[in-house]
Image (spheres, rainbow, N blue to C red):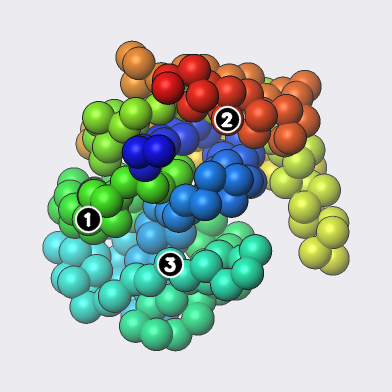
Amino acid sequence: KKAIAIAIDGPAAAGKSTVAKLVAKELNYIYIDTGAMYRALTYSAIENGIDLNDEDRLFHQLSEIKIDLKQSGNEQKVYINEQDVSELIRTDQVTNAVSTVAKHKKVREEMVERQQQLAKRRGVVMDGRDIGTRVIPDAELKVFLLASVDERAQRRYLENQKKGYEVDLSQLKEEIRKRDQLDSEREVSPLIKADDAIELDTTSRSIQDVKSKIIDLIAEKG
Ligand code: C5P
């Protein structure tokens, strides 16, 4: 069967990566987490004391770093110039700064270029904010995942609790809302549903249910 590209977009914490990983596993496809690439640059910029509003400096920093996404068992690992930064890019500091880095045109152009290289040979499930609209506009299947802010904050809250840290639920809600606003209102490739994307609201659906739905959609496409 011919390998295709599946684009999964949506707001923060809507379950994109969890669903994308499961779909990729089922199809034996490669999962590409584009958010991890923006996070990696953000981490690297903070480490190097770069002003996150300085587009040229950020672009230069990006040109200095090789970002690799590697699958190791069920885990996704992220490397900057061979250094494992998988955990370091998930801190609150990075999470709350990444949308500022991701708004810059030069940064996005370079990221999109790298992501298009990764998607060229198909057999990929890619998640992000502009995959269906910008990175793979000709993806064979586009999904836009949604969930209420309350539900998304609740899921993050439980995730955090499992990892052993306590975060205030209302603070999480506020951070998610803020990030969505920045991502949706930026000038370059804002978060928006592609016209031909299929919208799935995951608010009261299980992960398995959403995954099966996507697998069905692929089957329908032939
Ligand atoms: O997917 P994740 O929540 O890890 O993405 C982190 C941030 O990276 C998003 O809030 C957004 O600012 C940026 N991003 C983006 N375009 C993508 C993927 C992520 O602007 N394709």
Label 2 crowd (10 A; few <14 / some 14-19 / many >=20): some
Point out the image quarter for the C terminus. top left
Label 1 crowd (10 A; few <14 / some 14-19 / many >=20): few
Label 1 sits on what residue type? Gln
Give the residue number, with chain letter if any, for mark 2.
215
Q: Nearer the viewer, residue 202 or 187?
A: 202
Give the residue number, with chain letter if any, for mark 1.
117
Secondary structure type for disc 2 = helix
Secondary structure type for disc 3 = strand
Label 3 crowd (10 A; few <14 / some 14-19 / many >=20): some
The answer to whether one can see residue 130 in this image is no
Side of 149 relative to 122 (left or right): right
Nearer the camera: disc 2 or disc 1: 2
Point out the image quarter for the N terminus. top left
Q: Nearer the viewer, residue 161 or 26?
A: 26
The answer to whether one can see residue 155 in this image is yes
Label 2 sits on what residue type? Ile
Give the mark nearer the N terminus: 2 vs 1. Answer: 1
Label 3 sits on what residue type? Leu
Give the residue number, with chain letter if any, for mark 3.
69
Side of 219 relative to 194 (left or right): right
> Residue 75: where, in percent of width, then height?
62, 66
Nearer the camera: disc 2 or disc 3: 2
